[in-house]
Amino acid sequence: MLLTLANPMTILSFLAVFAAFAGQAPVEPAGIAAMVSGIVAGSLAWWAVLSLGVAGIVARGGERFRQAIARLCAVLLSVMGVCLLYSAAGLPFWR
């Protein structure tokens, strides 16, 4: 949960939500607590559903399935790393 809160996109999303409500009505502490609690509960529910769903899929797939997913993730991370290196060097990697 703390890792999610440290994500820059999450921080910007929180700022956008709070900015949208700024000046709309008098701010009450109970309203702020309800909004923050709702955001936290939604985030917690999302991660629980995602984790349980992936764990269920992987458990049904067996060892070969896990190895295939691990290889796919390794390839995707490698491609993203190469793209990042090209970008850092100022070279175009997408045309």
Image (cartoon, helix red, strand yellow):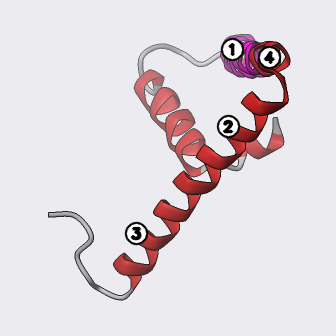
Residue in view at x 74 percent, y 15 percent: 57
Residue ID for mark 2: 69
Q: Earlier in the sequence, mark 3 or mark 4?
A: 4
Residue 33 is left or right of residue 28, and the answer is right
Residue ID for mark 1: 42
Q: Residues within 10 Å of mark 3 (few under 14, many from 20)?
A: some
- Most common SS among magenta residues: helix
Q: Earlier in the sequence, mark 3 or mark 1?
A: 1
Q: Secondary structure at mark 4?
A: helix
Q: Nearer the viewer, mark 1 or mark 4?
A: 4
CB within 8 Å, label 4 to label 2 = no
Q: Residues within 10 Å of mark 1 (few under 14, many from 20)?
A: few
The extreme front residue here reads: 64
The amino acid marked with disc number 2 is Ile
Q: Is residue 66 magenta?
A: no
Magenta-colored span: 30-54
Q: Earlier in the sequence, mark 4 or mark 2?
A: 4
Mark 4 vs mark 2, CA separation in Å: 20 Å
Q: Nearer the viewer, mark 3 or mark 4?
A: 3
Residue ID for mark 4: 48
